Image (tube, rainbow, N blue to C red):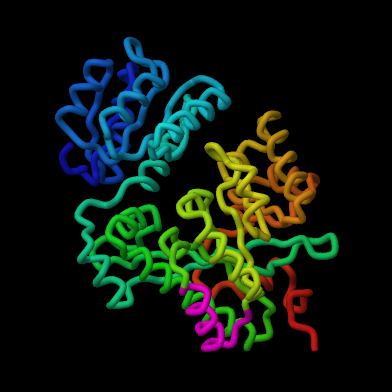
Amino acid sequence: MGTRESNLVLAVDDDADFLELIEQIGAGVGCEVALADSAAGFREQLAARRPALILLDLQMPGMDGVEALRYIARNGVACGVLLVSGMDQRVLASARQLGESLGLSMLGTLQKPAMIEEIEALLQRHMRPAGLTEEELRSAIVEHELVVHYQPKLLRVRGDWAVRIAEALVRWRHPRLGLLQPGDFLALAEQSGLIVDVTDFVLTDALRQIGHWRACGLDMAAAVNLSPRLVQDREFPDRLAGVFREFGATPEQLTLEVTEAASLHDPDLVMDIFTRLRVKGVGLSLDDFGTGASSLTQLYRMPFSEVKIDSSLVSEVATSKAAATVVRAIIELGHNLSLKVCAEGVETSAAFEMLDQMGCDALQGDFIAPAMPASEIEAFISVWEGANGALRIRD
């Protein structure tokens, strides 16, 4: 089917003004943009080009968005898909779920009319900068160009919110392109197999940081996203135990976040690894719950300690009755299964207050704090809880 063009966006929409806007924004963020304003143009572009991202209008004449998704899947087009529509969020969510059931990489939805900043952020988040190669990433690991930032996460403690954990998120200080976000290079890491090395780097940094925080008198834990490849490695729990000993951290201070997809292949092996991790005291969080066809069976069969509500639901909890109903149901379900429930992607005070009222156990998002260098965490804690807050380790 040809090689995917890593910096090409295909915008499919019958609105000429919207296509012109996408073309302008794409140029501003360094993307090449191809345009299609009809079903025939869409098919012609896919026959000639291999985009990394398709921005797809659901209401195209001649071929609606659902037909287009089936066409993409049938023709084996390997790219990300962002859905665009002026229809309500429930229709967008249903179309996104259909795309996922077809095996497509559904990256999100965009509701018209969209703000320029919103479109720009989506393109920047999902497009890989041109020229990134496996050799560059391999060199970045060896040359210590990868860095870890930490996003504080609030836990409910005796009826109040305290900073007790931070999620470790990898960044790449690229010598040519500057600071790259995970979306810029993690797909490359997965495709090349280097994701194992990247995950090992983040885990090591997080456990080292836990030990540092403890030496400073801070009772802080860390959460790390676990690569699906490591979920297939039976030796991983034993290797991880050695790293705990090296940095003076305890298993109880680490939570590993895994997506449901990571546990679908060879479930017996995954159950073996997950159970050993939990026996050792490591927390396990089911990430991105509430997207696609989230499986309740996985939730109660696997030994999770936490379920993390996906940001796509959390972002609508204060404005959509349907989203609020689903979030409330997930919180109740999690509690009935003796699981902690975390909401990620908390971006507004309204969402914060509603999730607080719903009894959510943990909150994370830019409204609370963005990801930051580890050196800034202590200052953030002091601002949030006061220099002599409850976070300090008691003698």
Residue displayed at 74% across by 69% down: 385
| Residues drawn in magenta | 235-250
The quarter of the rendered structure image containing the N terminus is: top left
The answer to whether 9 is drawn above or below residue 248 in the figure is above
Q: Nearer the viewer, residue 333 or 234?
A: 234
Residue displayed at 42% across by 37% down: 106
Place of residue 262 in the rendered image (x, y in percent of width and height, measured from the top left): 48, 54
Place of residue 201 in the rendered image (x, y in percent of width and height, measured from the top left): 41, 74
Dominant SS type (magenta): helix
The quarter of the rendered structure image containing the C terminus is: bottom right
**Left or right, 395 with reference to 16:** right
Q: In the rendered structure, does residue 247 fall within the stretch colored magenta?
A: yes
The answer to whether 195 is drawn above or below residue 7 in the figure is below
Q: Which quadrant of the view contains residue 90?
A: top right
Q: Nearer the viewer, residue 108 or 368?
A: 108
* Residue extending farthest front: 268
Place of residue 35 in the rendered image (x, y in percent of width and height, measured from the top left): 24, 26
